[in-house]
Amino acid sequence: MGKTVFVTGMAGYLGERLCRELDRGDFCDRFFGVDVKTPLSKYERGVFRRLDVAGGETAAWIREIRPDVVIHMAFMVQQVHDEGLMHRVNVAGTKNVLSASAAAGTRQILVTSSGTAYGAFPDNPVPLKESDPIRRHPHFPYARHKAEVEAYLSEFEAAHPEISLSWVRPSVIYGPSVDNYISRLFTLPVAMSPVGSAPPFQFVHEDDVVRAILFLLEHGARGPYNLAPPDTVTIKEVNRLTKKLAVPLTAPVMRFFFALAWRLRLPVLKVPESFLDYVFYPWAVDSKKLMDLGFRFRYSTAETIAIMLRAKGCISRP
């Protein structure tokens, strides 16, 4: 008899891709999942319930199913003005799922963290390795929550050595279907060109993220794994691809416009100005640990950003 898998964030764009792989692959016999939205896809081997990841019903269902594997992907990436809600989903939701999984006798758990957990600081090593410390960003909510989750993961790992716990730290996840505040920065009518800033950026294809998750589970991996192709690009290089008019903007000017758009809740730049630290300061990651285990990326950073830009109509197809 094969594995039973429980997936949180089943309706997210990444969750749906993972569940399609579970449905057609041989990793498990059945999988179950929750989300606050209903997935667009239907699955032959998957069972879905519309539940709150931080709620008691989700915990009760995990204890009832007693899954062999839990894949926790339910996080709020899109920034909202209600940070309390984001914290409840991102941090309390993680604690709820992992606590219920331990009580259910789950043997393997994988959590999707983020490269943003390292923090974006001028003195960051380039690239960051798993051995480098997690430095909680003082202001950007998503990154701060991921750092808090990682602190909890370390505590949980020490308290439950019987569970094979791993977590991935992806760079910016891109692909033809991605639509978020980061992808929109490159699809504006006019390109933004930060003055005096050229840190390296990495973009990991959504399919490679799904492949890496299953790869780590199949290998019984433990601990953190950075997840990004080895190559990098700069914002100026991306702007050259789009051939748009690039407007040079200093850090104070960009922070002013981002802060104004956020406070006025304008339908552009839907992210607080604290995110700009991740534009001006380095946070590229080293995936050697993952690749030494045998994983190979199908898409480079350059290929991934080009795929996304073509899907959005920002560059022509070759």
Image (cartoon, rainbow, N blue to C red):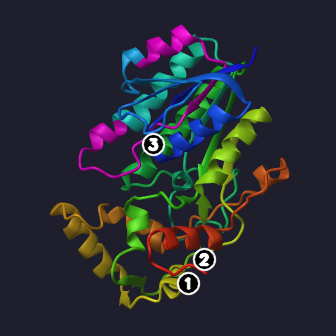
| SS label for mark 1 | helix
Question: What is the distance, in whole Å, between disc 2 and disc 1 at their CAs?
Answer: 6 Å
> Relative to 317, is 126 above or below?
above
| Image quarter in which the C terminus is found | bottom right
| SS label for mark 3 | loop
> Which residue matches tag 3?
12
Q: Which residues are magenta?
A: 58-87
> Which residue matches tag 2?
233
Residue 208: percent from left, percent from top: 66, 53
Question: What is the distance, in whole Å, between disc 3 and disc 2 at their CAs?
Answer: 27 Å
Residue drawn at the location 83% of the way across and 47% of the way down: 293
Q: Note whether residue 135 is visible.
A: yes
Q: Note whether residue 201 is visible.
A: no
- Amino acid type indicated by mark 2: Val
Question: What is the distance, in whole Å, between disc 1 and disc 3 at their CAs?
Answer: 30 Å
Pick the residue in front: 76 or 136.
76
- Amino acid type indicated by mark 3: Gly
Residue drawn at the location 39% of the way across and 26% of the way down: 54
Depth check, mark 3 against mark 2: the one in front is 3
Instruction: State yes or no: residue 151 in magenta.
Output: no
**Drawn side of residue 59 relative to residue 199, left or right:** left
> Which residue matches tag 1?
237
**Sequence-wise first label, 3 or 2:** 3
Depth check, mark 1 against mark 3: the one in front is 3
Badge 1 local density, few (<14 within 10 Å), some, or many (20+)? few
- Amino acid type indicated by mark 1: Glu
Residue 192: percent from left, percent from top: 38, 82
Instruction: State yes or no: residue 81 in magenta.
Output: yes
> Relative to 41, is 283 above or below?
below
